[in-house]
Image: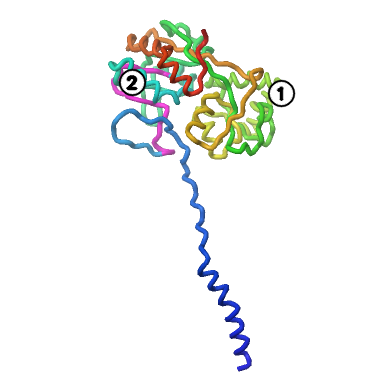
Amino acid sequence: MKLLPHLLLALALAAPAALSAQTMPTQKPTPPEPAHRFDPPWNAPFQAGVPFTVPGIDNAPDLYGDVVDPQLVVFFGGNQFMVLDDLLKEFRKAHPEYVRIFVETLPPGILAQQIAQGSLVLGNMRIELKPDVYAAGKNRMDMTPEWFARTTSYAQNRLAILVRQGNPKKVTSLRDLGRPEVRVSMPNPEWEGIGKRIEESYEKAGGAALKTAVMTTKVKAGSTYLTQIHHRQSPLRVLYDQSDAAPVWYTEAFYQKMLGHPVETVAIPAKENILANYVAGVMKAAPHAKAAEDFVAFLNSPAGQAVYQKYGFLPPVK
């Protein structure tokens, strides 16, 4: 019986704590972010049909439009994918006779191989279409002048550095990409023209030592990742915290910010930067020669130029 007062006292002390635990709102755990929350396609398809895109499994964002019996086939250097929605909309306004259009926005070196070999195999699909128009950087176009009936410049671009929002590694220049702890996503110069142009900028910013650090030492160490298709992989690697920084075309960083993705752009000063001149060529072997001429002319029309400048491209070389 002597224990009873002590027991009552203990219960009295415990009661407020128990009541507090019952009445306090419980904090809900933060749900995990979707695994593919930033995945492409970032363009909006203009075709009608059954939608079936499965991120990470069935997704081919760089094949665009009507692959069956197209009236116009365009091979664009991949870094121009963001203009397609508006560009083709405006082109159709000017030329409503072209209903079925097929566009590829793969790396220009891969497109060149496809033209030379005659087909592309993507997964289990084989595409055997000849382009009417091939458009890429001037250096790439100059490699095969015999392919073209005529060529014309239609836009320019420059480089920038893409980082995650908040810039956690405090990247302020190309020189910072040589730091061992900064994970870099870098276009492979073997088939991406931008890769060689970025190497030029490395040499401008830090000489041969910086280029060697990023392209040799850090590749061997695994802290520089060489992409297969940089205009898709580099932004995704930054967004998913697989890379800290990615040298890209300015327009690619500009577009990621247009999409509202959590990224920032680090500017590269003009003395360390380069200008890319984009050139479109009407193919000598174009299956749809009139459509090719109409499309290339449209690129330099006021409507075509307005689209390119909306997405951050510079006007063409005069």
- Is residue 67 located in the magenta-colored stretch of the structure? yes
State the residue at coordinates (52%, 10%).
317
Residue 268 versus residue 284 in the image, above or below: below
Q: Which residue is mark 2?
A: 101
Determine the CA span between mark 2 and mark 1. Answer: 46 Å
Circle 2/circle 1 CB separation < 8 Å: no
State the residue at coordinates (47%, 33%).
259
Q: Which numbered disc covers residue 114?
A: none
Pick the residue in front: 283 or 204: 204
Kind of element beneath mark 2: strand
Residue 26 versus residue 296 in the image, above or below: below
Q: State the image coordinates of residue 163 (x, y, percent, origin top left).
A: 59, 33
Q: State the image coordinates of residue 73 (x, y, percent, origin top left).
A: 36, 18
As drawn, is 146 to the left or to the right of 165? left
Question: What is the residue that sits farthest to the bottom in this orientation?
Answer: 1
As shown in the figure, which amino acid type bears the numbered disc 2?
Ile
Query: In which quadrant of the rendered view does residue 205 lie?
Result: top right
Residue 116 appears in view: no
- Which segment did they paint magenta? 55-75
- Is residue 3 located in the magenta-colored stretch of the structure? no
Kind of element beneath mark 1: helix
As drawn, is 90 to the left or to the right of 112? left
Q: State the image coordinates of residue 32 (x, y, percent, origin top left).
A: 49, 49
Q: Residues within 10 Å of mark 2 (few under 14, many from 20)?
A: some
State the residue at coordinates (47%, 44%).
35
Pick the residue in front: 218 or 181: 181
As shown in the figure, which amino acid type bears the numbered disc 1?
Ala
Q: Which numbered disc covers residue 209?
A: 1
